[in-house]
Image: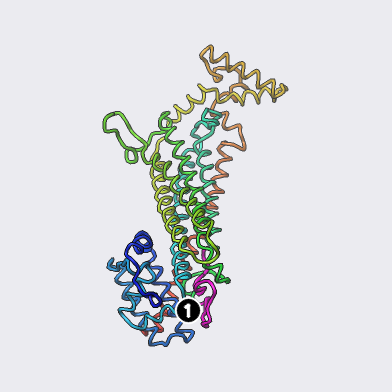
Amino acid sequence: MLWGGRFSDEPDKLLLEFMSSENLAYDARLIPYDLMGNKAHSTMLCEQGILKPAEAAEILKALAKLEEEFKKGKLQLKLENEDVHLNIESLATKLTEHAKKMHTARSRNDQVAVDTRMYLRDATLASISAILSLAKTFQKISQSNLGTIMPAYTHTRVAQPITVAFYFDAQTKQLLRTVQRLEQAFSRLNQNPLGSCAGTGTSWDISRTRTAELLGFEGVQENALDAVSSRGELEAELTFALSQLMVQLSRISEDFIFYSEKGFVSLSDKYTTGSSIMPQKKNPDALEIIRSRAARVQSSLFLILTAIKNTPTGHNADSQETKFAAMNAFDTAIPSAKILEAVLSTAKFDEKKMIHELDAKFANATDLADLLVQEGTPFREAHAKVGELVKECEIANCTLSSLKGKSVHQVVDIKESVEIKKNGANQSNVSRLLKQNDSLIFKHSEFVKEKQAKLEAAEKLLETAVKKITKA
């Protein structure tokens, strides 16, 4: 045990299993980030004259060997070493005694913070990419269905006619707001906590800006106490954005479960399942699972908030739970976006059935009332008259579309009803809205490319600095 100097007894296995067995499974994901953080920290210690070049070279060579072991799938974390940090240090020490100096001017408190931020940084960019891919698919569906009529609903009852394009434009705009939230969080996430040590700073003459540069961070968390105390804050912020995303995906899933049962849309055989007893069934299992998994991400957010709410300022082991929850949230949200994209990109709409539903449910009644208002009838009187007319049509088993007259036909015809709404599902208006989406999708895609390019540049800078020390 690397910290065992003041202890007379070894930690009981029961304690290690309770503290670390689950943690190690999640920490395995942090191995590449921990190795990267160790390389950057050791490089900086050497450049600052805290490590001798020969010592740093041996440490960096040991880390390179461990990196190769990891890539081959041979690097295993052991329970007795508690976490990824002590496991890597223990393995490096077996390769060179100089690795015992690697932890100078550092604590596991800032080490786990930097590892987690690097992991979340990549996960955030991956989630933005998945959401943008879904948004692009929604754009394609919209472009292919500019004039495809469908019902809009209020209170789960047919309201008025819109188009498939208008529906998906609304969904795209909500997706892009989630992307915006994640991008804003990214700037707060991409700050370097390394060098904060236990939360009080260090007397060593380190360069936190240098480790920030080598690890691709945009800045430094200036207050050491803030750096180690703020675990859970960004995890909650990111998980909130993912919760918002999953709420939207759940609602879309509910829509298409309903639409497919009504016969408005046909879901592909590739993304539906059958019944073990009923031969005719075609079940929307993927959509149902998305709907339920939204609860999983919301639970992750609640876990993070409740895990840290009563913790005192400073580092506490409670924050371990925030790491699990945030990782689980990303694990759920990204695949959910991908499967929804697959389901909807292969769905087929039946416009005839949707128009029939709109006609049968008097979805053009409001337009008829508006026509009466245009001809001088107060709206409340027009509303009452059309309501009475709807009642008579129900008794006579006919629809408003059967009414005669040129001006009347323009508003009671379902397709015409859509086109006369210049700020609604009118095709020219929706085309304008889709162009706005295209511009935003391009802008957000460039954000991802820019951030990924900067991270890749930082990796190259780190490798160059390492080679300078190891003379490799």
* SS assignment for the magenta stretch, majority: loop
Q: x, y (%) of residue 223?
A: 58, 71
| Residue at position x 37%, y 41% in the image | 286
In the rendered view, would you say 58 is above or below 220? below
Task: Look at the image and tell me in which quarter the C terminus lies.
Answer: bottom left
Question: Magenta segment: does it hold 176?
Answer: no
**160 or 7, which is in the foreground?**
7
Residue 443 can be seen, yes or no? no
Start-end of magenta stretch: 189-210
- Residue 156 rendering spot, x and y as whole percentages: 51, 30
| Residue in front for this viewpoint, 411 or 229 | 229
Q: Is residue 305 left or right of residue 369?
A: left
Q: Is residue 417 above or below residue 393?
A: below
Picture quadrant of residue 123:
bottom left
For mark 1, give the secondary structure: loop
Residue located 61% across and 33% down the image: 421
Task: Classify residue 260 by image quadrant.
Answer: top left
Q: Looking at the image, can residue 201 be seen?
A: yes
Residue 347 or residue 117, whichever sits in front: 117
Judge by depth and name the residue closer to the eye, 410 or 277: 277
Name the residue type under label 1.
Ala
**Would residue 295 appear left or right of 1 to someone viewing this image?**
right
Q: Is residue 26 left or right of residue 164?
A: left
For residue 413, above or below residue 162: above
* Quadrant of the drawing holding the N terminus: bottom left
Colour pattern: rainbow
Residue 31 lies, in percent from the top left, at: 37, 67
Residue at the disc numbered 1: 105
Q: Residue at x 48, y 42 (%)?
A: 143
User: Where does the image place residue 393, in percent across and percent down from the top left?
Assistant: 55, 15
